[in-house]
Amino acid sequence: MTTFIQSLILGILAGAVYGLFSIGLSLSFGVLRLVNFAHGDFVMVGMYLAYVAEHTWGLPLAAVLPLSIIPAALVAYLVYIVFFHGTGRQAEHDQLIISLGISIILENAALDIFGDTARSLNPLTISSFRFGGLYVPKAELLAFILSIILVGAIDLVLSRTGFGRAVRAVVANRAVAELAGVRSSRVFTLTFVISIVLAIVAGIVIVGYLPATPDVGSNFVLIGFIAVLLGGTGDLRGTFAAAVIVGLTESLVSIYWAPSVQDVVAYGLFVVIAMTRPRGLFGRGVGAIA
Amino acid sequence: MSALLRSGPVRTITPFLVLLIFLLAALQWAHEGVYEATIVVSAVGFALLAAGLNIIGGFGGRLAFGNTIFFGVGAFAPALGVTHHWYSALTGMVIGVVISAIAAFILSKVLWRLAGLLFALVTFAMSIMLQELVSLGNTFGGPQGLQEPLATKTSITGLALLSNYDYAVVGVVLVFLAAVLTWWVRRSRFGQQLLASRDDRIAAEANGVNASQVTAYAWALSAAVTAIAGTYFVQANAFIDSTTAFGLNTGVNMIASNIIGGLGTVFGPFIGAGLVGAGLLLNRLSSGASLPGLNELVYGAALILVVRLAPGGIVGVWHSAVQAIAARRRPAHDPATAEEAGTGTATPAAGADGVTAAGLTGAASLAAEQAALAGHLRSDGLSPEQSTAGESGYLLEVIGVEKQFGGVRALNGVTVGVRPSEVVGLVGPNGAGKSTLFNCIEGIERLTAGEVKYQGGRIDRLPTHQRARLGMGRTFQHVRLFRTMSVLANVSMPLVARGVGRTESLAVATDLIRFARLEEVSAEPVSGLSVVHQRRVELARAVAGGSTMVLLDEVMTGLADEEATEIGGLIRTLSTEFGVAFLVVEHVMGRLVPVVDRLVVMDFGRVIAEGSTEEVLADARVREAYLGAGALGEAPQAPEDTAAEATGKRGPE
Amino acid sequence: MTAEAMTGGPTGTGPVLEFRGVSAGYGRIGVLADVSWQVRRGTVIGLLGPNGAGKTTILRTVCGQTTVTSGDVLLTGQQITSRRTSDIARLGVAHVVEGRGILNGMSVLDNLMIGSYGRPGEIKDRLAGVYELFPRLSERTSQRAETLSGGEQQMLAIGRGLMMDPVVMLLDEPSQGLSPLMVDTVLASIRAVRDRGVTIVIVEQSPDLLAKLVDEVVFVAGGRTSAPMRPTVLNDPDILAPVLTQGVLPAAALDAEPQAVPSDNRREGR
């Protein structure tokens, strides 16, 4: 029984962090209809950023996080303007390929700079909290808390603020939103920036317990797409819930079956759901990625 | 002499000659050493992979990111057989190809409803899944993969050769064959239908193309080619592991080759693969480990630049350049120029190779020409044998059709019929249900109740392309033409879908084009045409398969009066001379008056009046529906009692 | 001539909306041909014509949603030809689209509040005003908009337009899909909007709604417009029939005299 609860704990902790970067992907896809294959690679960027901050500049995590927001936003803005702005009308797979190109660039830049040995942060002095027969790893817990806070904040912004309303309006009906005075192109830019910043921040906290390698992005992006699809494209809360489900599934599979199979199960889930329920597990999605 | 150089056969052979020369040069270079041969072998592998994807992704419009699945199958099948001594490599290749083709065919049907992006992602996920699965356990060699023993003698069953150079020779032959295959696919009837399905699935089906079937076969062919690429790879390298077989890098290279070279062209994948393959390997081998990722950075940047600046790839740039030069050299418009311009980016399909729109008269008076044309068309078989009506005497029968969308009843018991050769107009205010009725007849919407019969038999359960094959054509409210094809190719499509031979389709299509007064633009890509021309192309296409009946959805909307009159004339002639029946939806009743035999007026989801135009216009209910109650100077008349009408609701249009 | 009078600014007497020789369409498809037309402040204008005539295209051209190949579109004297839709909306043009354009998945309140996004101001007052006009909406503020009935959705769409504090409101077939009872309610609400000094343009396919409401009628057919006519023509089948069934504009223009204000409780125009 303890094993079960333990795996639940680990799964939820991991799932919440998956949720953090999946939300970004959900925003990017739900609002801009942009399939960003490089999203996972921005998580990787965050991971290496935290690593460099600690090893080269001696900055603790607590400092890196707030300091990285503005540069991350700037980078995201540049990426959007240079690569994606104005591509809305091109053939649907063009944006996918552009993002593929960005992914190639990012992964190989990482390979050039850091090589392919895994990079980790220095281990924490207290690595986990123990109670009963259970343990809660500290790094994961921190990541979890941060994810909850950030995702909660995004949710609040979307549901309670004027800007959030404008974003939802653009998703519901772009033309009508424009007629109400919403500048949809600005909404797109800002949403993309938020999406990437979330990915980078997720990376910063993930490296606390997962080592950084240049190819780690492709796994993350697939998890992200699984969460977005399972949760219903365009539904943020659904995406988060689905991400947690993915985390739980991986954790359970890893403990009860084999760690090497956990990805397979997750991807298999994706394939099956895509074929049978393109509207997601909760049936609230805006339909298949069409 | 210049005409000879521009003629079709020379045009077709030249690129192959260039390719051959280039391949021979590569072989010559490969002869110089192992290092050079290895590069050529690698490039060959990329080329075959890319060619495979091009068939389904380029021609079929379904970007199968996960085609690497079949590459892996084609590689592991012989590798397994050889390393475990189960069977020979040749047998392994056959197994790999067969499994791949069948799997692709089935998958295509299963994933048919997935939109393009999701399709790409799902197939990618499948490939990664396989990558993980295959690296487990030892059968497939675990993460290290399988190593085949190096060949000691040349063997066919072992698919074994002694040197890299030998493999390069075989590879070059395979590449040439793949190029020929690609060329053949593109110009074949099968390929034409595939391109049509890619350009506009709905229009393709409405013209008799079984899009799902054609695409499934295309993916099966693509998978087979890809599997052969896998076999080539494993035999030439004597090694395969799950990451190389199914992984992201292979997939990216496959896609990049196509994009950079030109997705959907004949030679694009080969050019792109040559660049990508050779480039990557050159860098890796020459710079050693110093900057393992630098070239790939350039590679990623190149990908992005191509997509943003030159979406047609290298071949696309080449075509644009050729067009620009040709346009500058010959400012005066003449058929030859039109054809060259037309054969630019939209490489034309059946018939346009060498056969220009020349041979026009222009001297004969219009009427005489039309009469001669009519005779021609009749002998072409355009006039269907006495189109069989049902016992009721109607060709198309809509009986008591109802359609419910959630709480709204769009169609409320519509009964309407069209007799052979009759032209029936369908009019009514917005929200009356005209478009919904059309969609139900077509098969785009399913009926809630009622029947639709054609030639006496029920069709309301048949898929759209089968209704088309029975002889029902249609045009669309927003014109749906196959945008990468010429006028001629568009009009020929229904004939192609029916399996009509090349010369015959060409003849019929050309005659129809002359009938619709489109000769001048016959070889032009449809994307550049004016609205009037586009509508006439759609009309000609709808009739081309020997349709007995055509549904016209607002064919006159957006046309000036003279243009509308002209199309009306074409409709009238098609009806009286060739016995084609029409059901025409139009907004402005007045435009239908000279065209129709009978008018049907709808409102509130049912028919409220029917008859000749005078009868209909005099009908009080019609006047009220159009002119409002105020015009009659009386309180609004309660329409006959039905659920919808009791609340006076009009449904969605 | 003062700048204000020239531009027909907020307190000027110039037309609120003006088309000067406008030809417009969608991409290469031309719809409107050389349309010239004026809408005077505080009036309610009806645009009537058969489908496909270009009525909706006229409204969309005002909002920058079409390709204008020639001519000028002016709002209170200001050039707005082909400007960005969101910018035009922010100048005070409220376009209630055909089919209502409800934002599905969002609440009634959200649908209303989005109207004030581009035109900040005394939002609480505007909201109160909308609820006063449409009490049904105040009972359903947190309900999802797509669950409302057709009539309620129309009220919501008009309400959202009001939240923009508009100078001119464009209504595209507001009676479509509604029962006669609901049409009356919508009618009353449009009158109330007019009474607040908003200039209104209504597009309709059938004359019934317009007859009870408009100060002037302009017929639209084949991408062209007639001169403005008195609303009495809406009861005249000899004028209506050619337009609505044949697409032929009335030949003679019956000049509409500047109307005396028909109702008493009209506030001062803005």
Image (cartoon, helix red, strand yellow):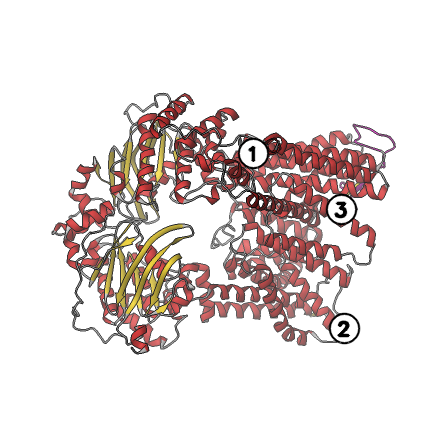
Depth check, front residue: B363 or C67: B363
Q: Mark 1 or 2, which is nearer the eye? A: 1
Q: Residue furthest left?
A: B633
Mark 1, secondary structure of its residue:
helix
Query: What is the crowding at mark 3: few (fewer than 14 residues within 10 Å), some, or many (at least 20)?
Result: many
Which region is colored magenta?
B135-161
Type of amino acid at the residue the image marks with label 3: Ala
Same chain shared by disc 2 and disc 3? no
Quarter of the image for residue A141 reads: bottom right
Q: Which residue is mark 3?
A: B278
Label 3 vs label 1: CA separation?
30 Å
Q: Taking A45 as reference, is B57 left or right? A: left
Mark 2, secondary structure of its residue:
loop
Q: Which residue is mark 1?
A: B191
Judging from the image, mark 2 belongs to the subunit labelled A
Depth check, front residue: B400 or C115: C115
Judging from the image, mark 3 belongs to the subunit labelled B
Query: What is the crowding at mark 2: few (fewer than 14 residues within 10 Å), some, or many (at least 20)?
Result: few
Type of amino acid at the residue the image marks with label 1: Gly
Residue A121 place in picture, x, y as percent: 74, 69
Type of amino acid at the residue the image marks with label 2: Thr
Q: Residue shown at 25%/36% (left/top)?
A: B594
Judging from the image, mark 1 belongs to the subunit labelled B
Same chain shared by disc 1 and disc 2? no
Residue B150 forms part of the magenta stretch? yes
